[in-house]
């Protein structure tokens, strides 16, 4: 796993979480900006998952690593579905929580990756 790419992914997740919180505080429903941001975050997570699975051999805690990796891949589509279903201010709140969770889980993936190095 590339540390720079993971850092970029963490930053993107935190930025999307901030946009979701601002949108929720303003009492606005989810718009195309949040949907596009969540879609881009999912594409970035899928790319990271491909890179991580290609070099999985040197990770010490493989089960934990794969669990976190699967979680980061599943969270954005679930948040997109739930956020679109919820047309109140809580839709963007769901997006904010999901983006923050992806950022935290990516940081943990990086810790597990570097522990095996």
Image (cartoon, rainbow, N blue to C red):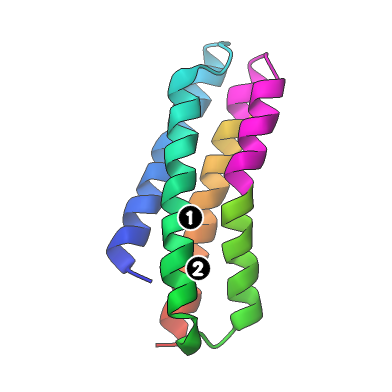
**Is 14 placed left or right of 4 in the picture?**
right
Q: Earlier in the sequence, mark 1 or mark 2?
A: 1
Calculate the distance from the C-alpha at mark 1 to the C-alpha at mark 2: 14 Å
Callout 2: few (<14), some (14-19), or many (20+) C-alpha neighbours within 10 Å?
many
Badge 1 vs badge 2, beta-carbon distance below 8 Å: no
Give the camera-side residue of 11 and 69. Answer: 69
> Is residue 85 shown in magenta?
yes
Q: Is residue 105 above or below residue 57?
A: above
At horizontal 37% and vertical 60% (from top left) the residue drawn is 6
**Is 7 placed left or right of 35 in the picture?**
left
Q: Which residues are magenta?
A: 75-93
Kindly report the secondary structure that dominates the magenta region of the rendered protein: helix
Q: Position of residue 65 (x, y in %)?
A: 58, 74
Q: Position of residue 112 (x, y in %)?
A: 50, 76
Q: Is residue 21 above or below residue 73?
A: above
Q: Is residue 65 above or below residue 50?
A: below
Q: Is residue 87 above or below residue 108?
A: above
Q: Of the numbered discs in the image, which one, if any, rests on residue 109?
A: 2
At horizontal 32% and vertical 69% (from top left) the residue drawn is 2
Point out the image quarter for the N terminus: bottom left
At horizontal 57% and vertical 54% (from top left) the residue drawn is 73
Under tag 2, what secondary structure?
Answer: helix
- What count of labels does the image hold? 2
- Judging by the rendered image, the residue that carries numbered circle 1 is 46
Q: Position of residue 89 (x, y in %)?
A: 63, 16
At horizontal 48% and vertical 60% (from top left) the residue drawn is 106
The residue mark sitting in front, 1 or 2, is 1
| Quadrant position of residue 63 | bottom right
Give the camera-side residue of 4 and 73. Answer: 73
Point out the image quarter for the C terminus: bottom left
The outermost residue toward the left is 4
């Amino acid at each position: 796993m590339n540390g720079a790419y993971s850092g970029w992914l963490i930053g993107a997740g935190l930025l999307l979480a901030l946009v979701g919180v601002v949108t929720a505080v303003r009492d606005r429903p989810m718009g195309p900006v949040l949907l596009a941001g969540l879609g881009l975050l999912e594409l970035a997570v899928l790319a990271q998952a491909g890179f991580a699975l290609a070099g999985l051999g040197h990770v010490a805690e493989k089960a934990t690593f794969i669990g976190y990796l699967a979680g980061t891949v599943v969270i954005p589509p679930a948040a997109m579905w739930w956020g679109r279903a919820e047309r109140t201010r809580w839709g963007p709140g769901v997006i904010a929580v999901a983006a923050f969770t992806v950022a935290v889980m990516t940081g943990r993936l990086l810790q597990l990756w570097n522990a095996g190095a």
